[in-house]
Amino acid sequence: MIEIRWHGRGGHGGFTAARLLGLAASVYGGNYAQAFPSFGPERRGAHVLGFTRIDSQPINDHSQVYNCDYVIVLDETLMETFDVTKGIKEGGLLLINSSKLPQDFNIQKNIKVHTLNAGQIAEEVLGVPIVNTVMLGAIAALTGIVELDAVYQAIDEVMAPEIRDRNKKAVEVAYNSIKGVSL
Amino acid sequence: MEKKHFLSGDEAVAFAVKLCRPHVIAAYPITPQTVIVEKISEFVASGEMDCQYLHVESEHSAMAACMGASLMGSRTFTATSSQGLLYMCEMLHYVSGSRYPIVMVNANRTIAAPWNIFGDHRDSLSQRDSGWIQFYVENAQEALDVTIQAYKIAEDPKVSLPVMINLDGYVLTHTYELVDVPPQELVDQFLPAFQTTNKLDFEKPKSLSFSAPPEWQTEFRFQQFEAMEIAKEVINQVDKEFGRVFGRTYGGLIHEYCCRDADYVLVAMGSVAGTARIVVDQLRAKGKKVGLVKLRSYRPFPKEYFQDLGQRVQAVGVIDRDISFGYEGAVYSDVKAALYRPGAQVKTVNFIAGLSGRDITKENLAQMYEPLEALALGEKVSEIQFTGLRWT
C-alpha cells in the first residue's frame, strides 16, 4: 500500500488534490483508494493535511496515516513550523512547491527530495497561485502511481466545467516538466 | 450494472437514500448536521430525486416531521449527529412506540462536555433504550448497502420498527472510498414501494399514537420486545437476500473473522473492525490463535451468538468507544452478560478506546490482544482498561 500526505493551507485545495489522486487511482486506475482530510473544523489559511492511500487490494485500514511513502508540500512556509519529513519512510519522496533547489532545504534523512516551482506554473496556466493540480501532475510524473489520462478523467468528474481545461493543462505542464528528470 | 464511484461515507448514504425513493426528507441543516442531507438536497434541487424536502427548525422537529409523514404512509429519511441526536431523543421514543419504520443515519460524534466534534459512540449508545434498531457499519460501501437493507427490515410488517444506522464521524463520514452504486432497477426489485396499514386512512379511520392506560401499556411494550426478537431473524434474512441480488453480504447481526479455532477474540463495532482484521492477520502470522467479532447490530443484540461464543473461546475483549460512568463500557456489559452462562469459563476484559476521535491504531489493537492472551493462560489482568491513557 502506498500512503501519501499532502500539506497545504485551508483554501489551497490540498484535500481536493488528495481526493483527485484517489479517484484517478481507483475509479480510473483500477486500484483501491482512500482519501481523507485532517479531521476537524475547516479553517481557511490554517495548516491542513490531506491523505491518500492506494493499494491493489481493498483497503480495510481506517486508522490514521503515520508513515508515508510520499509527502507533498503545497506551501513551503509551512516547513518553518512543522517537520514535514515526519513519518516519511526510508527511501520515500518529499516534493516541495518551491523555487529553491532540493539541497537548499538541507534535509538530513534518507529520502528523495524534489522541488518544483509550482507557483509559477499555476500563475502562468491558471492565473492564480493555486498549486494543487500542478503538484498532482508532478507526483504522477515522479512516481508513476497514476496515469495522466486517469488524472484528466478525475478532473473532468470533480471540477466545474469552466476550470477543467485549465487544470488539466496545469497537470500536463507539471508532468512534462518533471518527466525525464531522474530522481 | 453497478457503477463505481469515489465517495465519502456521507455521500454513499445520500446515494443509497436516493435509490430507496423516500417521499419525505426532513432535516435541520445547521451544526451538527452532515453532508448527507446537503447532498440529498442537491439531488432534489436538480430533479434527480422526487421527494418533499423539509427544512425544519430543529432535530426534534425533524423527527416529528418524519413521524407525521410516516403516519401518512410515506417512506421517510433524516440524518443527524451527536447533540442533534440527543435533541431529538423525545421523538425517538414516540416513533418507536408508534412503530413507524423511519430510517435515520447518525454520524457518530461524541457529546459535550468537554466540547468536541470528533467521533465516538457515546451519542448513539446513550439512545440504547429508545426502541430503535441500531446498526454500526465499517466503511462507505457498508453504509450504502445497510441503508438499503434498513428500509426492508424496518418496513417488514413483522418488525415495523425504526432503524438508526451509525457511521463513525470523520473516519467514515469524511473519508472517500471506492463504492459500488447499484442500479435503480435492482434496488426497486429488492425494495418495493412502502405498504402499511399503520397509517391515517379516511376509509378505515383509527387512532394513532394514542394514550395507553396502565391496563394496556405492558402489552404494547411486549409487542415492541417481540418485534425486536423477530427483527434478529429478519436482519439475517434481508442480508442474505441482499447478497443474492447485489453480491455482497455482511453476516447479519455479526461478522466473524478467524473465530472458528480462536483462543481469544476481540469484539468491535464500526470502522475499527477493518483495522482490527489487519492486526488479526499479523498476529495469526506469528502463530497466535486470535479472532475478531464485528458486532453489526447492537439492538437487537445477538445474545444467542455470544452465549455460544462463550463456550468456544477462552477470553473475549470488548472495545467500547463509550463508557457508562459508574459501571463500564456499555457494549461490554451486554457482551459479558450474554457470555457468562452458568458454567462458562470464559474470561473478559473491556477496552475503553477511541473516545472523542482519538485514533485506535494497529499498535493499540495488537496490545489489546496481550491481556487476552494472559487471561487465556490463566493470569489476572485489570478488567477495565483505558487504551492510551496518559497516566494510570
Image: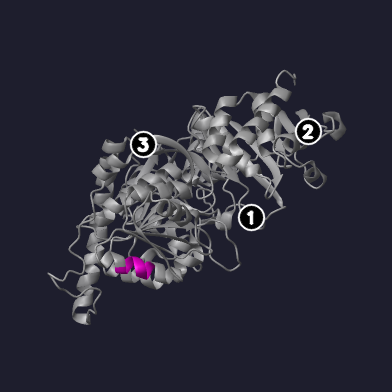
SS of the residue under disc 2: loop
Between disc 1 and disc 2, the foreground one is 2
Q: Residues within 10 Å of mark 2 (few under 14, many from 20)?
A: some
Which residue position holds label 1? A42
Q: Quadrant of the C terminus of chain B?
A: bottom right
Which residue position holds label 2? A117
Q: Is mark 2 in CB contact (under 8 Å) with mark 3?
A: no
Question: Which chain letter goes with mark 3?
Answer: B
Q: Are marks 1 and 3 on the same chain?
A: no
Report, in whole angstroms, how far the alpha carbon at label 2 lies from the one at label 3.
Answer: 57 Å
Front-lying residue, B214 or B210: B210
State whether residue B245 is above or below residue B162: above
The amino acid beneath tag 1 is Glu
Q: Which residues are magenta?
A: B63-68
Front-lying residue, A62 or B334: A62
Report, in whole angstroms, how far the alpha carbon at label 1 lies from the one at label 2.
Answer: 27 Å
With A51 as the anchor, is B14 left or right in this view? left
Say if the magenta span includes residue B64: yes
State whether residue B328 is above or below residue B64: above
SS of the residue under disc 1: loop
Q: Residue at x 66, y 45 (%)?
A: A49
Which residue position holds label 3? B260
Q: Quadrant of the N terminus of chain B?
A: top left
The amino acid beneath tag 2 is Asn
Question: Which chain letter goes with mark 1?
Answer: A
With A57 as the anchor, is B309 left or right in this view? left
Q: Residue at x 75, y 38 (%)?
A: A123
Q: How is the image coloured?
A: one colour
- Residue B303: % across, % down: 31, 54
Q: Residues within 10 Å of mark 3 (few under 14, many from 20)?
A: few
